[in-house]
Image (cartoon, grey):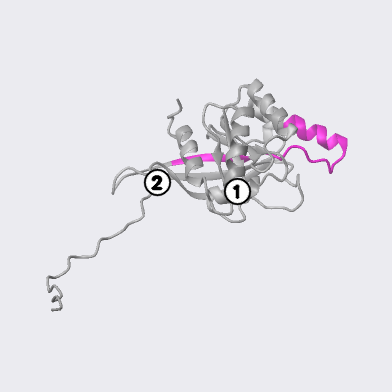
Amino acid sequence: MQKQKKSTKPMGPKPQYTRKEPKGPRIIAAKYNTSCVKADQYPEGDTVEIAFIGRSNVGKSSLINSLCNYRGLALVSGQPGKTKTINYFDVESKEDISETEERRYHWFLVDLPGYGFAKTNKGNRNLWSSFIADYILHSERLMLLCLLIDGRHPEMPIDKVAYDWLVEAGVPLQIVVTKVDKLTAKEKSANLAIIKEMYPTATPPILYSSLKHTGRELLQQRINKVLVGDEA
């Protein structure tokens, strides 16, 4: 059997693969601004605020660090309820309009104390409850509040109480489901169905893993709708 001769036809150039960047603004910088417990301590101005709240030990600090791509921005503690003040972070997002033009957005990420911790005296706990409520009810710059739900425990009564209160207050809500990397595919599907039924909002829940950064782009897109004024 006669062997076929190899083709001497020159090969074309190898295809070039480039990473597709997500459209819209992306977070490029973040830094701590201030902490407060009273309205007269809030930063001045009209900067848009996007707040995050959840049950103690829901993984809020880790999510904030992941979202901003800044390890250590929000301190991660092994002691639930460690955050006891309203913490403001300056965040800058940048959008490339063209090769020569860009647009930048400055906003506050507001880290609210976790609810449900008990290692404090009654007086502090009452104060904790009141200043969080005062902020949520009276901050005119609060454009979106992300309520974090632990994906492993979607039926916690305290989360439902928080959700019902926020809905009653008329706060624009986004449900963010944390720690989804700890779930099997079957658990994720079942728990997501529970969350959609228990915590209905105008937009679907966002599944997030701070460990793998899953959901980071989706959460940025949700925030971008607020920044660019593209809310439905």
Q: Residue at x 63, y 23 (%)?
A: 167
Sequence-first disc among 2 and 1: 2
- In the rendered image, which residue does mark 2 sit on? 22
Amino acid under label 2?
A: Pro
Can you name the residue that lies furthest to the bottom here?
2
Q: Give percent across and percent down for residue 215.
A: 52, 45
Magenta stretch contains residue 116:
yes
- In the rendered image, which residue does mark 1 sit on? 184
Please tell me in which quadrant of the rendered image residue 42 appears.
Answer: top right
Magenta segment range? 105-131
Q: Residue at x 57, y 50 (%)?
A: 31
Circle 1 packing at 10 Å, graded few (<14), some (14-19), many (20+), is few
Q: Residue at x 46, y 35 (%)?
A: 227
- Tell me the quadrant of the picture where the N terminus can be found: bottom left
Q: CA distance from mark 2 to mark 1?
A: 27 Å
Mark 2 in CB contact with mark 1 (< 8 angstroms) = no
Q: Nearer the viewer, residue 227 or 155?
A: 155
Q: Is residue 95 above or below residue 13?
A: above
